[in-house]
Amino acid sequence: MFQRHGDNPILTARDWPYPAHTVFNAGACQSGDKTVLFVRVEDRRGHSHLTVARSSDGVSNWRIDSKPSFPPDPANYSEEEWGVEDARVTWVDEDRSQWIIAYTAFSHSGPLVSLAGTTDFVSFSRLGAVMPPEDKDAAVFPCRFGNRYAMIHRPVSAGSSGAHIWLSFSPDLIHWGEHQLLLHARRGAWWDANRIGLGPPPLETPDGWLILYHGVRVTAGGCLYRLGLALLDLEDPRRVLRRSDEWVFAPETPYERQGDVNGVVFPCGWILDKPTGKIRLYYGGADTCLALATAQLSDVLGYLRTCRAPRAGKREDIALLDE
Ligand code: BMA
């Protein structure tokens, strides 16, 4: 379904205008005639910041900011002490007319979810930490549901049986509640056993909100990060309509299998070109480089129509954990 671009990896640390150890896990959006990537850059201390790269074709001739566009600001936001990572970018039109960036702030107490807004990817206004640690893999929906914003995220609690994907609501993007389990990590031998997390922000399609998520399989040789699909009800995103049993994308090429963390494909951004129905998926390869894969939305939705609908009712879905 997802075809790797022939020029992969499309960005590496060698392309960077200043010293960088690795560049990976980028948020993505189309801003006017430019594709904008909000790239995670890890420096040689091991700390990450976010830097903007712009391109007209989304593949080549990237114009990269000459210094970090969004460095951590621990003096004012102590939760950013060890860096900022893995941004997901959503255009929120209603009431806001700005890009809302959900990112991971790496605090002394663990990773947590922070939000920031921007209209131009030049200046940013932080909304601060919105979820306590440990929590990451968050993205805001582009619209409100009954006047409430919605956000997907992945909390982890000590003693829990796994790390699952949750959904929360907010009147103002700052105060979040109505927390509920949305997708559970399966157990046992499944590719998405024990730990899952959202990839790019939910994508609105005629069939529902398209969700791409990663599942982490712990093996004797290390972790394997692979990707699966789900579909949420357009009006009520608490309802899961479909979920793939199989993964649809997995580390195969050398730049996905070998790097700082072997065996990782980690997408944080995708862009749908509405006229052609083509999705461009931007993903980190092995925590080292940035790569691109494309798919036709109609193929993805056609595949999801063959996938099962989770059993009705949230409670029964949770009960699946014990199957
Ligand atoms: C996750 C995140 C990602 C990273 C992945 C694989 O927990 O930290 O940024 O790509 O692990 O190392």
Image (tube, rainbow, N blue to C red):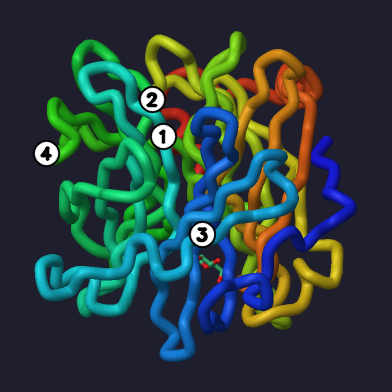
Q: Which residue is mark 4?
A: 175
Quadrant position of residue 33: top right
Q: Does the beta carbon at disc 3 come under 8 Å from ligand 1?
A: no
Q: Inspect this view and state whether residue 154 appears.
A: yes
Q: Residue furthest bottom?
A: 45
Residue 227, given in percent of the width and then of the height, sits at 67, 48
Q: For the residue carrying disc 1, how many other residues have a C-alpha within 10 Å: few (<14), some (14-19), or many (20+)?
A: many
Q: Which residue is mark 3?
A: 39
Q: First in sequence: mark 1 or mark 4?
A: 1
Q: First in sequence: mark 2 or mark 1?
A: 1
Amino acid on which disc 1 is placed: Thr
Of circles 3 and 1, the one toward us is: 3
Quadrant position of residue 174: top left
Residue 151, given in percent of the width and then of the height, sits at 32, 35
Amino acid on which disc 4 is placed: His
Residue 35, given in percent of the width and then of the height, sits at 59, 40
Q: Which residue is mark 1?
A: 90
Q: Are marks 2 and 1 in contact (CB under 8 Å)?
A: yes
Q: Which residue is mark 2?
A: 142
Q: First in sequence: mark 4 or mark 3?
A: 3
On the rendered structure, is 248 left or right of 43? Answer: right
Q: First in sequence: mark 3 or mark 1?
A: 3
